[in-house]
Amino acid sequence: MRSEQRILTTHVGSLVRPPQLVELLLKRQDGDALDPALFEAMLDRAVADVVRQQADHGVDIVSDGEFGKSFTWSMYVVERLAGVERRDDVSPDARPSQASNDQKRFADFYREYVAQQGVAGLGREARLDPRPLVVTGPVGYVGQDRLRADIERLKRAMVAAGVETGFLPVVAPVSATRMIVDRHYGSEEAFLFAMADVLRTEYQAILDAGLMLQIDDAYLAYMYDVMVPPASMEEYRRWAAMGVEAMNHALRGLPQERIRYHVCWGSWNGPHTNDVPAREIVDLILKVNAGGYALEMANPRHEHEWRLWGEVRLPDGKVLLPGVISHATNIVEHPELVAERITRLARLVGRENVIAGTDCGFAQGPFTRRVHPSVMWAKLDALAQGARLASAELWGRPAA
């Protein structure tokens, strides 16, 4: 899609789950017996409601809120894979390191911050399985039924809400492998490309269903903060380039115009002092065979990077989906600020090549939210209002 007559609006996908759904997910995670029909009915209602609310708040391109995923934005996929299992006989220390330089520098802050997270709005912690995820054999995709249910549920909700265009977010290969211990492939590259082949099943099914595909790849940027130092920028870029190559391997032959690629620096509200600058990875991002690129441009650590698009040429036929609303603060952006963020970028890359969005998801997963749900909807209101103001300025007509 392009903003041919006005600035269109969307977001990154993950929305705050309603408390009733979170309760059922917690019970299922704890091993409690649930009536499958009851759970599916609850999920149907929740998705129908969240799609209707997106439409009511002015979102043009909607998602299912990622409500069908019972785990995080990246690790949901392990429930859909053969060859990956939880193991008691593998030490948690065998997991690839996720500790970043930012976390080391601000260790006191992160101890306090993590302790405050808990289950979204319910005042308690999710009891996550501490056993490492381990690749024990060739990975394969066995989640067809869950994927089909996600697709059909979103499409039904779109029809009921009168929405024409929707997307489903799924994980990128390099982000899917970062929390899993490999005991089968023997090299990161072999495991990564095997995962790319498996994830292609999800990608193709979503596109074949007539939906837009969003690929989430937070680890592409985040791993700089884990690796550098002690690794060099050259070593990090070599690793990231392998991730992009695997991404394109998964996307081979798929319609680029219906694929959007989301890169962020992590959804938590932290210092982010060691984030890799966008200019250091923009060439790698643009190598991904997608039609649109969703990037953070609203939070205080990265807002200045909109100027980069005065130096870097956006390839023909591509669009930017800039974050003009931040997920990392409960302050609701003023619509005039949103309009300013949109118009200054549109003047660099062309108004038709900008679709206004959010920096990241409003929820890390079903159990961790980044803003209060009432604030989330107010932010999406501000997004829609700002897009209308920007459209009036860019197309030279009064705002609706």
Image (tube, rainbow, N blue to C red):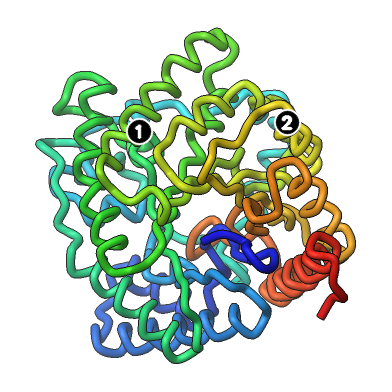
Q: Is label 2 or label 1 in front?
A: 2
Instruction: Give the spatial CA distance, label 2 vs label 1.
Output: 40 Å
Most extreme residue toward the left is 137
Depth order, front residue of 47/245: 245
Compared to 380, does 114 lie above or below? Answer: above
Q: Quadrant of the C terminus?
A: bottom right
Compared to 349, does 155 lie above or below? Answer: below
Most extreme residue toward the front is 396
Rendering coords of residue 283 (x, y %): 54, 25
Depth order, front residue of 195/256: 256
Using the rendered view, name the quadrant where residue 310 is placed.
top right
Depth order, front residue of 283/346: 346
Q: Residue at x 59, y 78 (%)?
A: 54
Q: Residue at x 61, y 38 (%)?
A: 265
Rendering coords of residue 2 (x, y %): 57, 59
Residue corresponding to mark 1: 92
Q: Which of marks 1 and 2 precedes in the sequence?
A: 1
User: Is residue 112 in view?
Assistant: no
Give the mark count.
2
**Mark 1 nearby-residue class (10 Å; few <14, some 14–19, many ≥20):** some
Element at badge 1? helix
Compared to 167, does 287 lie above or below? Answer: above
Tell me the amino acid under the disc marked 1. Pro
Residue corresponding to mark 2: 308
Disc 2 vs disc 1: Cβ atoms closer than 8 Å? no
Using the rendered view, name the quadrant where residue 120 is placed.
bottom right
Rendering coords of residue 330 (x, y %): 78, 62
Disc number at residue 155?
A: none
